[in-house]
Every structure is written in structure tokens, then in C-alpha cells.
Amino acid sequence: MDTMIKTPVADSAPRIARERPLKIKARNVDVYYGEKHAINDLSIDIPDSAVSAFIGPSGCGKSTFLRSINRMNDTIPSCRVTGNIEIDGRDIYDRTLDVVQLRARIGMVFQKPNPFPKSIYENVAYGPRIHGFARNKTDLEEIVVTSLKKAGLFEEVKDRLDHSGTSLSGGQQQRLCIARAIAVNPEVILMDEPCSALDPIATARIEELIDELRQNFCIVIVTHSMQQAARVSQLTAFFHLGNLVEVGDTDDIFTAPKDKRTQDYITGRFG
Ligand SMILES: Nc1ncnc2c1ncn2[C@@H]1O[C@H](COP(=O)(O)OP(=O)(O)OP(=O)(O)O)[C@@H](O)[C@H]1O
């Protein structure tokens, strides 16, 4: 595994960050909404082929930082991001960088499943088609089927690919959104509370899927559920009032947190 390391990392770095190549490197990131200072001097290393969870009480900046990773914050006029965020060593706020290309490399899955009001097939085919990933219809079909299989949905929908994506159950819709994200072959998948609108069975299915996908993707998940963070992630980052208080191997964060605020949060003293 050591041979996979691209960048030297400190001995004090989390084990997972030493075992996996570095994918996302953020340094001294501040995010403002007008006068509101939402993220304060945040630095973090996020490894590839692993799941990293952002946890913390409501309003502490988890989603804000997640949205900084694919420059979704650009769409909010009052929002300003300073500092440095690199993916594979490339500054994603570089003025010469094509944001459309960047977002193709970084899939995003939202809290509420949001399939397009189109067929199941079209939901998955749309991205590869507009990005020119398929040479012909057969190629496109193969991408759709493979993506639905990877998202664990193909068997349930193979006989009704022409039905509307919105006709599926909530859990199936979320897996369709994951298939849609995977179809453009992203390197990073950002998930903002992807199970919060789902029942426990659909949640378990998505968690299993996240675990399978981490072999091939860098996954970052915002979750309100500490149980979920403990179950699916290898790295956990605890946010509080716009500060990244502590980041470490998930096992360590939940069994031996270093900061009292982390300890108070995971033991339910606030949040
Ligand atoms: N579009 C926006 N305009 C202005 N302020 C915003 C905007 N989005 C978020 N904020 C503020 O930034 C801070 C961080 O919000 P953010 O949504 O990132 O927190 P969070 O930790 O993801 O919260 P939650 O767990 O409730 O989703 C909050 O004070 C929030 O009110």
C-alpha cells in the first residue's frame, strides 16, 4: 500500500491518509456569505479510495465546505471563498480552470433525491451524452447499464428503463442519482446528507453502496448521523461554529477524541 503514496505525509497524519493517495488538499480556507464568516481557516487532507465524513452540529459549515469542493458556492452571489483547494495537485479556484469540467469530475448527491423528470434511462444517459463519452447508441447503453449496476439498481429497473425516474421509491431515486453521478466517471463524489430523506432499509442499502464505491472513488459525505459516519467512513472531520475542530481516523474520533468539543458532541452533550 505504501507504494500508492504520492505526497509525503506527517507521521501524525491519520492512518488512512498515510495508506491512501492524497486526493483533496485544502489550506487556510475561509468562506463568507456577505459579512457572515461561515468557514474559518480550514485545512484538511482528504484521501482517495476512502470515505471521509463531515460531522458537527447544524449550521457549523459542513455543507458550505462541501460545496467549496466543486465550486457550487460560485452560484451564490454573496459567497466568497479564499485560501487554497487542490484536487490532484491542481488549484480548483485557478481562473483558467473550466468549472463545467471540474463539476464533471466531481459528482454530487443531495439530501433530497432529485432525478430529472425524464425516464430512468435518460437520467443516467444525459451526462455521458452531453460530455461526449459515448461514440454511439450501443456505447451509451453500456454506460447506462454499468452505472445502474454499480449503483445497485439495475435488477430492480431493467424492465422499465423507459419509466419516469420520479416513479421510483425514495431509496431507488437516490440510487438513480448515484448512478447518474457515476455515469460521467467522476473522481470525487460529494454527498450532502444523502440518506436524510430515506427510511432505515433504504438508508442501509445506500450505506452498503457507499462502502462498495469507495474502492474506486474519493467520497466525502456530510451526515447528521454519527452512527452513519462510524459505519461508512474511514476519516471523520468534526466541525463546530465554522471551525474544523478535529480530523482523524474514524475509529479514533469515536473512541478517543482529542478535543473536548468533539468528545461533547459525540457523547450527545450538544448538537
Ligand atoms: N446561501 C447562504 N447565504 C447566507 N448564509 C448561509 C447560506 N448558506 C449557509 N449559510 C450560513 O452559513 C453557516 C453554515 O451553514 P451550512 O449550511 O454550511 O452548515 P451545516 O453544518 O451544513 O448545517 P446543517 O447541518 O444544518 O445542514 C450557517 O450559519 C448558515 O446560516
Image: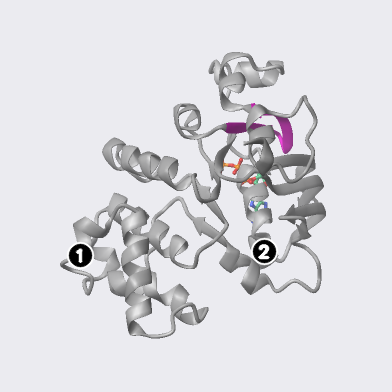
Check mark 2 vs ligand 1: CB closer than 8 Å? yes or no. Answer: yes
Q: Nearer the viewer, residue 86 or 11?
A: 11
In the rendered image, which quarter contains the C terminus? top right
The percent coordinates of residue 147 (x first, y second) are 37, 62
The image quadrant that residue 69 belongs to is bottom right
- What kind of secondary structure does the magenta stretch mostly adopt? strand
- Camera sees residue 56: no
Where does label 2 land, which residue?
A: 76
Label 1: how many Cα within 10 Å (few below 14, some 14–19, many 20+)? some
Name which residue type carries label 1.
Lys
The percent coordinates of residue 230 (x first, y second) are 49, 27
The magenta region covers: 235-248
Residue 246 is one of the magenta-drawn residues: yes
The image quadrant that residue 212 belongs to is top left
**As displayed, is residue 96 above or below residue 37?**
below
The image quadrant that residue 11 belongs to is top right
Label 2: how many Cα within 10 Å (few below 14, some 14–19, many 20+)? few
Where does label 1 land, which residue?
A: 158
Name which residue type carries label 2.
Ile
The percent coordinates of residue 149 (x first, y second) are 31, 57
In this view, which residue lies farthest toward the bottom? 136
